[in-house]
Amino acid sequence: MALKEILFSNNASTYLKESITSTDTELKVLDGTGVLFPEPDADEFFYITLQHPKNIYFEIVKCISRNGDVFKVERGQENTIPYAFPEGSYLELRLTKGGLDHLKRTIEEFQNYHEFHFDNEDEIVINHGLNKYPIVNIINESGELIYGDVTYLDRNTIKVEFSEPLTGIITLL
């Protein structure tokens, strides 16, 4: 399974416009300041740190969508406790340990790709040994992305079929 993409922006910070309870999953920030933050798609997110105005406590949340100045979040990330936060609490997109761990896993995933070359074939069976159902990309000899019928025979074997014999590279992620 591909990891979701983590998003960043420079100097993104603002304040809560309204107080929140420890179970709220929607944050409203000061008018016009939401634009400082990324706007994640379904496969993207970013981390926000909430900080009480008197520095009594903080919480890391995962923002999974933003619509203007309203953020939808998953509370209590990275072993932090969901707290109630008053209006005026500080909110900032920060680089966190969880964010760095996510980047590390993403880099490792893309470094662990496997290439299989094929020449004038209409059916290829690949025993990849990855113990997963990998993402399959197929590039023909002209460097164009092409499509084949991919069948996962098990977690370590795929079969790729084409309508005619082709030459190219199959990349597994």
Image: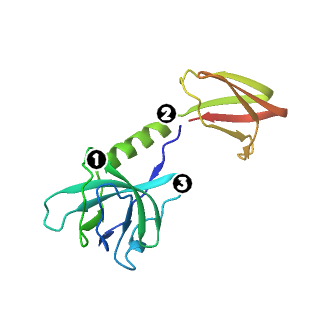
Disc 2 residue type?
Answer: Asn
10 Å crowding of disc 2: few (<14), some (14-19), many (20+) = few
Residue 112 numbered mark, or none: 2
Q: The residue tagged with tag 3: helix, strand or loop?
A: loop
Q: Amino acid at mark 1?
A: Lys
Q: CA distance from mark 1 to mark 3?
A: 22 Å
Front-most of 79 and 1? 79
Residue in the foreground of this view, choosing between 134 and 29: 29
Residue at image position (29%, 55%) is: 22
Q: Earlier in the sequence, mark 3 or mark 2?
A: 3
Amino acid at the residue labelled 3: Ala
Give the number of the disc on residue 42.
Answer: 3
**In the rendered view, does 88 fall on the left or right side of 131?**
left
Badge nearest the viewer, 1 or 3: 3
Q: Residue at x 38, y 44 (%)?
A: 102
* Quadrant of residue 119 within the rendered picture: top right
